Image (cartoon, grey):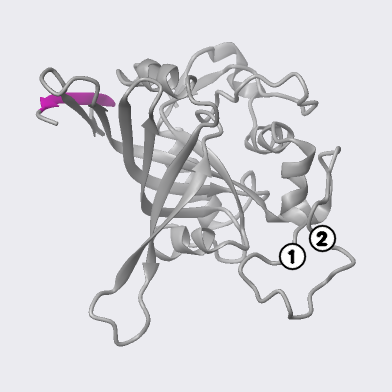
Amino acid sequence: MSFLPSAPWRDAFLSHISKMPMPTFVLSTLHRAPPGSLTEWLPRARTCVFRGMWCALPENDLNNAEKNPAAFESDCVTFTTDKRMLKYGEIFASGEAPAGEGVSGGGGPVEAVWWVEEVGFQWRVKGRAYIVGNDIDDGGLGAAKAREALQQRMGTKDEKQVAEWTWSRELTAHFGNLSPTMRGTFKRPPPGTPADKPYDDKTLQLGTKLKGLDDAVARENFQVVVIVPDEVEKLDLNDPVEGRRHNYIYQAQSGRWHMEVLWP
């Protein structure tokens, strides 16, 4: 991790997203097609909630989790998921970093799209998604690959605080930033399974509220997903005459972004 210039699109992106009543976006992943299909992969899309940039957790006075110091800044988008959901497996199946016996890793290709009606802009982020789970500090190959991929995009803001920053503290702070009702969703019945089939109804229930941060079942299912962007597109749809598409492509060797102005 070293000094990286802030992404040229970052401030505008965060400013636009802040105007949304709820910062939802559509996330597309790749799902392996059934045997005998004409294609290897099928698209899968769903609505997710943006949870801030990695290393820059949004302020929340109700979050009583210990926070990391502001040692780093990144251009990586975050959201949360339950490891029992399909997108968790899809990110691993299409990625470079299998979890093995752990839960962290992935690297599968994804696209995230925001339509910000309040300002008339569409944002598209294309990149690779990595799972940060409860083995991120000391897990196997998957955790190591995730740490490596994210560290390459974590620019140092304060060298004096780097040693105080930990992966597991960042993960717990994300859990703490959720409402008690949202934390409780990680103890719901297994997502996508038939509602008439038996399950552990003593442990898993809909409508659970968790005020604390240490529920073992919820924390086992809770994961932070971090999108490492390779390409970002800002599309201005305000003016049919003056509208433009700004396309930013990450240059890995220099750590900088190349921008082109395109017709919409």
**Residue farthest toward the front in the current orientation of the protein:** 240
Secondary structure of the residue carrying numbered label 1: loop
* Residue 241 lies within the magenta run: no
Q: CA distance from mark 1 to mark 2?
A: 6 Å
- For the magenta stretch, what is the residue range? 255-262
Secondary structure of the residue carrying numbered label 2: loop
User: Which quadrant of the view contains residue 264?
Assistant: top left
Q: Which residue is mark 1?
A: 189
In the rendered view, tell whether residue 127 sits above or below residue 232: below
Q: Which residue is mark 2?
A: 205
Q: Nearer the viewer, residue 264 or 172?
A: 264
Residue 247 pos. (x, y %): 20, 30
Q: Residue at x 63, y 26 (%)?
A: 165
Residue 62 pos. (x, y %): 78, 23
Please name the amino acid that badge 2 sits on: Gln
Please name the amino acid that badge 1 sits on: Pro
Left or right? Give the position of 240 relative to 228: left
Residue 108 pos. (x, y %): 39, 55
Query: Label 1: how many residues lie within 10 Å, few (<14), some (14-19) or many (20+)?
Result: some
Q: Specify the quadrant that holds the N terminus.
A: top left
Q: Which mark is residue 107?
A: none
Residue 4 seen in this snapshot: no
Left or right? Give the position of 49 relative to 220: left
